[in-house]
Image (tube, rainbow, N blue to C red):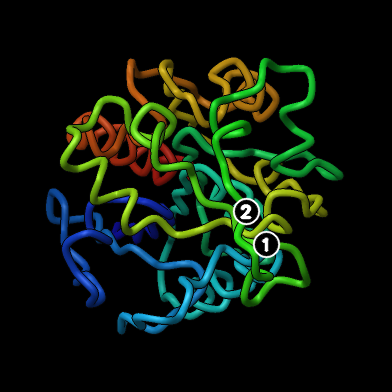
Amino acid sequence: MRRERHDHDRHDQDRCQTHHRPRPRRVRGRVRLQRTDLPPRSRRLHRHRPAEPAARPHSDAASIRTRVAAIDGPVVLVGHSYAGAVISHAVDGLDNVIGLVYLAAFGLDVGESCLSAQDGYAPSLLATENAPTPYDAPGAPGGPDLYINPGRFREVFCGDSSDELARAMYATQRPLSAFAFTEAATVRGWDRKPTWYLVSNDDNSIPPQLQRDMADRMHAHTEDIDASHTAFVAHPKRVADFVERAAEDFAERV
């Protein structure tokens, strides 16, 4: 059986190295891997144009839903960070999705937002080390873009990556609109599909205990890794193996 995995990471090395769509590749001859950006954007660099942010979970999910619905075959959705909220919405109405994988990602309940889900937990560095822009976020109903402050970017986001890579990731980071962080979920998604969750133990962006609690609520198969918020950058083989095993598990249930 061929499974198609769509990877929805907002920050990774590929953004530093390429501006063309990655070609799908096969793993072990059976799983086709393909990354999808959220939402579709121009690949050209505009010197005076601010980067388009993650606009809001509902609209980003609609973009993914349209793409995935056109795929002939079973699909596994993989979300990192904010994109966890997106895939939870996107799966609604998609019969070809056989499972969800969360990588240090938000798995929201109905009525929660990425911000409100953190109530009751010690504030993450991301909550205190972000800076708003003076302009409204393009594509969002209102409010600014949010960027991570440069002085502590590596500590907040990718503490297990090199200084050089952290500088590149800072320079190419996609902003998150303030509205995307506060829009409440209207569906769970994870309550109708099998889920796997990889907790990052050294995460300074989403509290690790919140990650564990979200995974428990999902009844997800859960593993952890001693890594920062971007475990897939510092430990790509370990994370890729996790995703592949998840896909194998989902396929066996079909």
Residue 118 vs 170, above or below: the answer is above
State how far apart marks 1 and 2 are (Cα): 6 Å
Give the residue furthest to the right: 111
* Relative image position of residue 153 (x, y in whole percent): 39, 37
Residue 223 vs 62, above or below: the answer is above
Q: What type is the residue that disc 1 sits on?
A: Pro
Q: Are marks 1 and 2 in contact (CB under 8 Å)?
A: yes
Q: What type is the residue that disc 2 sits on?
A: Pro
Residue at the location (54% across, 26% down)?
125
Identify the mark nearer the N-term, 1 or 2. 2
Question: Dot 1: what SS?
Answer: strand
The residue carrying mark 2 is 132
Residue at the location (24% across, 34% down)?
241
Residue 249 figure quarter: top left
Category of crowding for the residue at label 2, using alpha-carbon neighbours closer than 10 angstroms: few (below 14), some (14–19), many (at least 20) = some
* Relative image position of residue 56 (x, y in whole percent): 68, 63
Residue 64 figure quarter: bottom right
- Tally of marks: 2
What number is the disc on residue 106? none
* Relative image position of residue 143 (x, y in whole percent): 74, 63
237 sits left or right of 43 in the view: left
Check the picture and name the quadrant holding the N terminus: bottom left
Residue at the location (86% across, 44% down)?
111
Category of crowding for the residue at label 1, using alpha-carbon neighbours closer than 10 angstroms: few (below 14), some (14–19), many (at least 20) = many
* Relative image position of residue 158 (x, y in whole percent): 33, 33
Residue 31 vs 151, above or below: the answer is below
Q: Return the residue nearer the eye: 92 or 139.
A: 139
Q: Return the residue nearer the eye: 124 or 75.
A: 124
Q: Return the residue nearer the eye: 207 or 192.
A: 207
The residue carrying mark 1 is 144
149 sits left or right of 134 in the view: left
Q: Return the residue nearer the eye: 71 or 101.
A: 101
